[in-house]
Image: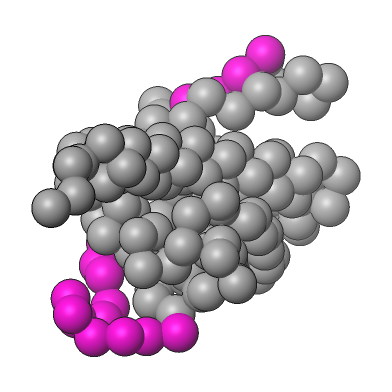
Amino acid sequence: MTEVFGTITVKAPYSVALDAIVRFLRARKNRIKLTVPLKGTGLGLEREVNVNFLAVRGHKGERHLHDELQLTWEPSGGGPFPTFTGSLKMQALGNDTELLLSGEYQPPMGALGEAFDALIGKKIAETTGQQLLAELKAGLEADFAAVKETIEGTPRA
C-alpha cells in the first residue's frame, strides 16, 4: 500500500467551513472532477480523476474539533490505475480551518506497478491530492466571503 497525505489552510473559521464544505459538495452531488497534469510522465498531458465523497461523520449543531469525510478517487476511463481510498478531516486552526487529506492505494500489476509507483505514481497521487485540496480551499473561501459579505451588508437594528 502507498500512503498519501496533504494539508492546506483555508482562510475561513471552522464554524463556517464545516457547513460550507457540505454545501459545496451537495452542489456537486458529492463528486468533484479534477484534471491532473501529467507532464513528464509519458502518460499524456493530463488525466481526469473522479473524486467521490462517501459520508460525513459528526452531527449538525454539535461542536467538534474535527470532522471527517470519507472519499475515493479513480481516473476516468479506467486503465491500470489504482483507486485511492481515504479521508478528509477538518480542524480549527485559530481563525482558519485546516484540511487534512490522508489515504492509501494499492499499485496494480504487482512488482511492475510498485516500480512505476516508486518512480512516478506516488507523485501523481500527491499532485491529485494537492489539486483536490486547492479546489476545496477555493470553494470554501468563496463561500465564506459570500457569507461575510451578507452579514456585513445586513442593516443592524
The outermost residue toward the front is 157
> Is residue 113 depicted above or below 103 in this figure?
above
Q: Nearer the viewer, residue 105 or 142?
A: 142
The residue at the point 37 percent across, 85 percent down is 64
**Magenta segment:** 45-65
- Res. 30 in view: no
* Left or right, residue 100 beside residue 110: left
- Magenta-span inclusion, residue 111: no
* Left or right, residue 58 beside residue 68: left
* Left or right, residue 116 beside residue 75: right
> Is residue 109 depicted above or below 90 in this figure?
above
- Magenta-span inclusion, residue 47: yes
The residue at the point 40 percent across, 39 percent down is 145
Horizontal and vertical percent position of residue 95: 56, 65
Horizontal and vertical percent position of residue 25: 27, 47
The residue at the point 69 percent across, 40 percent down is 127
Q: Nearer the viewer, residue 36 or 25?
A: 25
Q: Could you say which quadrant of the image residue 62 lies in?
A: bottom left
Horizontal and vertical percent position of residue 2: 68, 65
